Image (spheres, helix red, strand yellow):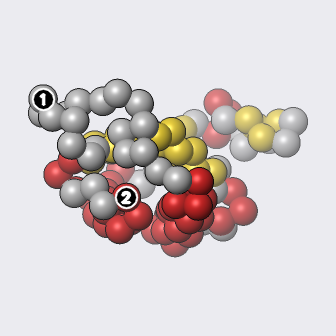
């Protein structure tokens, strides 16, 4: 049930957006060792954003996942930053990532929760 939410100030044409979310979905599934059929990727692009006082290309990512391995966040950060850099041309030092370990009973799907 991983959910990767991406917010970037880059303006992206539709084809680039679709390519990016597909690529990031595969990257995330592989990095977490979870089936891609449970992975969701959300992309919001072109809002007004600043990082370090600059509006140069930047991104904020939030990764929610049940059982997110805290000891692997550095490895996940490297994989996600690499993928975002490849897809959007945003340098890794212009990317923030928030990692959120979701509790099974607080994440719903298919009329139930992952604790059912």
Query: Residue 57, percent across and down?
Result: 27, 46
Placement of the C terminus among the 4 image quadrants: top right
Tell me the residue that label 2 is attached to. 88
**Who's the residue at 66% across and 67% down the image?**
35
Question: Measured from the top left, where is residue 82 in percent x and y?
Answer: 31, 66
Picture residue at 41% right of the left edge, 30% below the top: 47
Q: Earlier in the sequence, mark 2 or mark 1?
A: 1
Q: Compared with residue 26, is residue 3 higher up or lower down, i.e. above or below?
A: above
Residue 42 shown left or right of residue 45 in the figure: right
Under circle 1, the secondary element is: loop
The answer to whether mark 2 and mark 1 are in CB contact below 8 A is: no
Look at the image and tell me whether residue 20 can be seen: yes
| 75 left or right of 106 in image | left
Residue 80's x, y, as percent?
37, 60
| Pointer 1 local density, CA inside 10 Å: few below 14, some 14–19, many at least 20 | few
| Residue extending furthest toward the left | 52
Q: Dot 2: within a 10 Å radius of its alpha carbon, few (fewer than 14), some, or many (20 or more) residues?
A: some
- The percent position of residue 65, horizontal first and vertical second, equals 53, 47
Circle 2 sits in a helix, a strand or a loop, which is it? Answer: helix
The residue shown at (41%, 64%) is 87
Question: Which residue is the site of mark 1?
Answer: 53
Task: Determine which quarter of the picture holds residue 105.
Answer: top right
């Amino acid at each position: 049930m991983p959910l990767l939410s991406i917010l970037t100030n880059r303006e992206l044409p539709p084809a680039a957006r679709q390519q990016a979310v597909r690529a990031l979905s595969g990257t995330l599934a592989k990095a977490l060792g979870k089936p891609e059929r449970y992975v969701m990727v959300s992309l919001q692009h072109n809002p007004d954003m600043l990082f370090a006082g600059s509006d140069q290309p930047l991104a904020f990512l939030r990764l929610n996942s049940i059982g997110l391995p805290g000891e692997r966040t550095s490895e996940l950060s490297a994989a996600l930053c690499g993928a975002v850099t490849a897809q959007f041309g945003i340098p890794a030092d212009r990317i923030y990532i928030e990692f959120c370990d979701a509790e099974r009973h607080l994440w719903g799907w298919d009329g139930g929760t992952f604790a059912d």
